[in-house]
Amino acid sequence: MKPVTVLDVAGLPDHAFGHRSILWWGTLGFMATEGMAFALAAATYLYLSARVPEWPPDVPPPNLGYGIANLIVLLLSVIPNYLAKRAAEEKDLRGVRLWIVVCLLFAVVFLVLRGLEFTSLNVRWDLNAYGSIQWTILGLHTTHLITDIGDTAVLAVLMFTGPISGRRFVDVSENSFYWYFVVGSWLPLYALVYWGPRLL
Amino acid sequence: MSDELMRGSYRGLQEVEPLGSTWREGEGLIAWLSAIGHKTTGRRFVLTALGFFVGAGLLAVLMRLQLAIPDNNLIGPDLYNQFFTVHGTVMMFLFAVPVMQAAAIYLVPLMVGSREIAFPRLAAFAYWLFLFGGLMIFFALLLNMGPDNGWFSYVPLAGPEYAPGKRSDFYAQTVTFTEVSSIAAAVCVITTIFKLRAPGMSLNRIPLFCWSTLVTAFMILFAMPSVMLATSILIMDRLIGTHFFNPAEGGDPLLWQHLFWFFGHPEVYIIFVPALGMVSHIVEAFSRRTVFGYIPMVLSLVATAFLSFGLWVHHMFAANVPQLGASFFTAVSMMIAIPSGVQIFCWLATLWDGKLVIRTPLLFVFGFIFTFVIGGLSGVMLASVPVDLQVHDTFFVVAHLHYVLIGGAVLPLFGALYFWFPKVTGRMLDERLGRLNFWLMVIGVNVTFFPMHILGIQGMTRRIYTYPSELGWGPLNFVASVGGVLIAASVLVFFVNVVKSLTAGRAAGPDPWGAPGLEWATSSPPPEFNFAMPPVVTGRSPLWENRDEWPVFSGLSDKKREVLVTTLLDAEPDHRTDFPGPSIWPFITAVAVTAAFIGSIFTAWAVVVGAVPIAIALIGWFWPKAGED
């Protein structure tokens, strides 16, 4: 048996965006597993709410102010992330630098408001099971937020210091992709944390 | 296979420089800790998992010695509780799941014709985390802090009220640890199979072991978060006073059972499905024909995965669940026997039509079919609510689960060890010792676990450290203990065989079994870069189909770790991508995560403080090195 070269791949590009890149699939894998964790936390919430006659038990529901403000900030943050992603895919370094910094600013504002959200839950985690799940859901989402902010910050620094390569642009694009997940997963969780105590 | 091809795939390293030095791992302690090649990671992973298997197996032998005669007081009740808990926890979380993933980390890139696994640093990180998590639970046992509430650690027994001390916390963190590792490995495997296949390896040509690990990896992504959530809220109940499982404050102990078994039943299939893939490869190689019914096989794997998420409540029939719901879970529990049956018949058809070459790996497959079918039958019995209520928590269940797990996973795994050992080490294992290994194991398993069916029906409950002689359980227990010693002897024979092979084994050559897969189209052991001339695939059994000419592709750089990325469905060449080189950071990150996990057993602040070194390590990991990128 003799090896025969039937194909030469030297002419192919050395990076690709979106579902063509392996990073996209890796990110999607983690999103799937983290999304599942969110779904199970939500199921736990509904399970616990069905176990007691009143939900929330003996405490006022969370205040809405910071939650709504933060929801708006989060939804708006999709815009700079979209622009950063588009700039990355066009390999527009100036655009990437601009929009990734804007993303970071949004994230910081969001994190500060998130801190205030914890104070407006009107329950401690160790008061009852209702308090426990409220804190857990908010905490679980915040962990993802912090991780992604860390990631964005490191990328932002790299975009200013270099070295800049095609792969670095793929990183920026995937970072925005992950942020969409952080935003999207918050919507049902937001409904549970703030409206579950009012409607269930 | 001609010399020419082999020269192509493993020519002396000088001849393929600079490819060899591009992929080489380096020497010395730092290089050893920095190694990220998938074969290095896979080998370490398999060895470590086997080490944990031996450790947990010795605990089982000690338990059998304790139960061998009535009124025995070799091991007291407290230690016995720790033994069965650590035995179960280690076998499930630190052996059965990881060893299958470890095999995948080693084999999948070779089978799909790639030079490396996707995200090799993440795979290395998964290994270190697994190692540290496993060592932690054994250290806890040595310090008399071993968990003692059973491998499924039910609350309220494992909760703050009834389990003071740190034993349950060690359980919780060991589990969380190893699941992070599993998920990371699953992401690597999925991405490798989706995107790094050889050109031409379309979905309908993927080797069955790759299909089975792909299906398993998806199950891991969706099942593991459930147990991680469960153990996390358990440790929160114990450490910071949450009330998830406390009925006095609106919590519910049954919540634990739901979350645990929503993971726990898929878990059984996470262990079993990769073994199915291994069996298909062994059957194919030794019956000298392609596997009968490739498409039904793949569909059965996928069906098993879906159904496995719909039967968790059958572990809770004895708890207060609605009867209508229980009927649904009974139906699914019986239904899952269908895809398993389809696969068994496909293998039988393959064997029937093939020209059988009986070697040790195939013997283990026969042992698997025989043992697993018995376990499957007692499983169908247990799926029925009235039977389940009758034998719940008795040795009947112990018999069933060992039949399915040993029959379904350990026997195929040993078959696989004999089958792929020559590829990994370049040397054959001895056939005579192999046969001895096989017979001791199959006889041992049946002698140990068959009597337990009867003991269970006679009413012997599980997890008791002794029993009075008047109950008449003595003789069967003695028989079971003799079987346990036989199993231990069979494992010893295996290790003797390994040592003998490594010192004086016959050289294997690239394809000692005449098997058709791509992993056999390179030298044994494969070079760091797997294939000097990466293959192009034209069918399901490359080495059987291309007898004259071996299609390969060129154009990957040999000065950097470049890998070809192909399209998801048809595996058409899409682009090239650079892979990272060795790095110490995955190891450092794993150490930092371990410190945070161990700290969190004692104080919740460890999570906050521990986040700082983890963040630093992660930045170090992702920061591009000079000259790289």
Image (cartoon, helix red, strand yellow):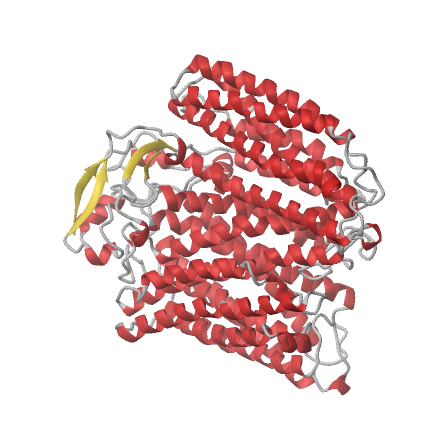
Residue B9 in the image, given as x and y percentages of width and height: 26, 45
Query: Horizontal and vertical percent for residue B20?
Result: 32, 37
Can you see residue B504? no
Which picture quadrant has residue B256?
A: bottom right
Viewed as shown, does residue A51 lie left or right of B621?
right
- Taking the view exactly as shown, the residue that stands out farthest to the front is A199
Identify the residue shown where x is 71% and y is 31%.
B609
User: For this view, does B298 lie left or right of residue B329?
Assistant: left
Query: How many circles with numbers are drawn on the protein?
Result: 0
Which residue is pictured at 71% across the width and 47% down the height?
Answer: B233
Q: Position of residue B608 (x, y in %)?
A: 71, 32
Quadrant that contains the N terminus of chain B = bottom left
Residue B417's place in the image compared with A94, above or below, is below
Q: Residue at x 64, y 21 (%)?
A: A108
Quadrant housing the C terminus of chain B: top left
Q: Is residue B614 visible?
A: yes
Foreground residue, B295 or B585? B295
Q: Horizontal and vertical percent for residue B593?
A: 63, 38
Horizontal relation, residue B257 to residue B292: left or right: right
